[in-house]
Image (cartoon, helix red, strand yellow):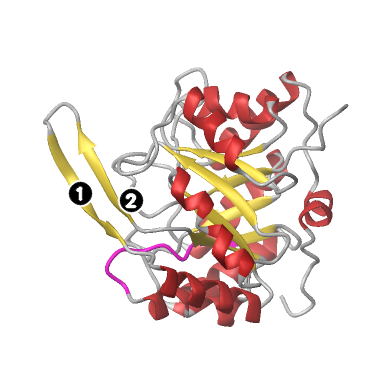
Amino acid sequence: MAFKKMILSAALTGAATNRAHCPDIPYTPKELGLEAKRAVDAGASIVHIHAREDNGMPSWRTEVFEQITAEVRKYCPDVIINYSTGAIGLSIEDRLKHLPATKPDMAAFNMGSMNYAIFSKSTKQFIWNGVFENSFDDMIKVVKTMNENNICPEMECFDTGHIRNAEPLKAMGLLPDNACYSLVMGVMGGIPATPENLIHQINQVPEGAFWQSIVISRKQWQLSAIAAAMGGNFRVGLEDNFYLPNGDMAKSNGELVDAGASLARMIGREIATIQEARDMLNIPIKTNA
């Protein structure tokens, strides 16, 4: 039996890297709007976005998210916008205040607490580390806010236990039927990015649920091929990996999406259009967006 069409997501900018790492990371709302268009033109249906100040520092100002929404909608009126809610050192209220103001189609829903770090193997030192707090009480606040604003939860699962954390929320009637599972791999503090671990994670997802792989680092291409071959979906973009399959640094999110679309087609997967993705995920266009 043929698989469904594959939904490609693009994570445009992230929050942990800057132009010293990759000179083409977008910062401003205008740049994010143009990068969204490049990603959509190459085949992305979903754009995942962290807000930044114009100097590249992470931003949680509602007005910046509003400016990003306007710029993305200018160039991509029907793309599925997915905003971040993940941060270390901010209250859950500050992490959520942009959602009622912008009402994106989708938003990241972090499914558990964890150590979160960047470790240098060469220096044997932590470049950065902290505790990413997502208690069940906070998770309940997050999903209630999403439900109140008709936002599809994108459940970011950094380890096997995070997948299971959806079960009590489902039992409480808080998770909508179209909530998506994102299997995040390769973050220090989370599950390592290996083929064996990806297959294990896939096998934990409830039957019939939408899932995608999110692989941090150059291992992304290998594991994305596995995700596509197993009937799933995957995310690419400058947040997760700067490099194309041939080892060259990408100059835009569009180049990464194009490589992802080519990879999927080689495995026999057709790429969903934005409207097809909306139909598959039951995310209609919002009339107030």
Q: Please name which of the two marks, 1 or 2, marks the residue nearer to the observer.
A: 1
- Secondary element under disc 1, as helix, strand or loop, is strand
The answer to whether 102 is drawn above or below residue 161 in the figure is: below
Q: List the residue tagged with mark 1.
A: 128
Can residue 235 be seen here? The reply is no
* Residue 75 position in % (x across, y down): 69, 59
What residue do we see at 62% from left, 72% from top?
Answer: 174
Q: Amino acid at mark 2?
A: Ala
Task: Find the magenta span and give its range.
Answer: 82-90
Label 2 Cα crowd, 10 Å radius (few <14 / some 14-19 / many 20+) = few
Say if 118 sits above or below 27 in the image: above
- The residue at the point 53 percent across, 32 percent down is 200
Front position in the image: 178 or 13: 178
Q: Which residue is mark 2?
A: 16
The answer, for residue 14, to whether it is visible in the render is yes
Depth check, front residue: 39 or 193: 193
Residue 182 drawn at (x, y percent)? 56, 47
Q: Is residue 76 left or right of residue 198?
A: right
Q: Is residue 79 left or right of residue 143?
A: right
Q: Mainly helix, strand or loop, the magenta region?
A: loop
* Total marks placed: 2
Residue 42 part of the magenta segment: no
Residue 39, how many percent across, how many down? 63, 45
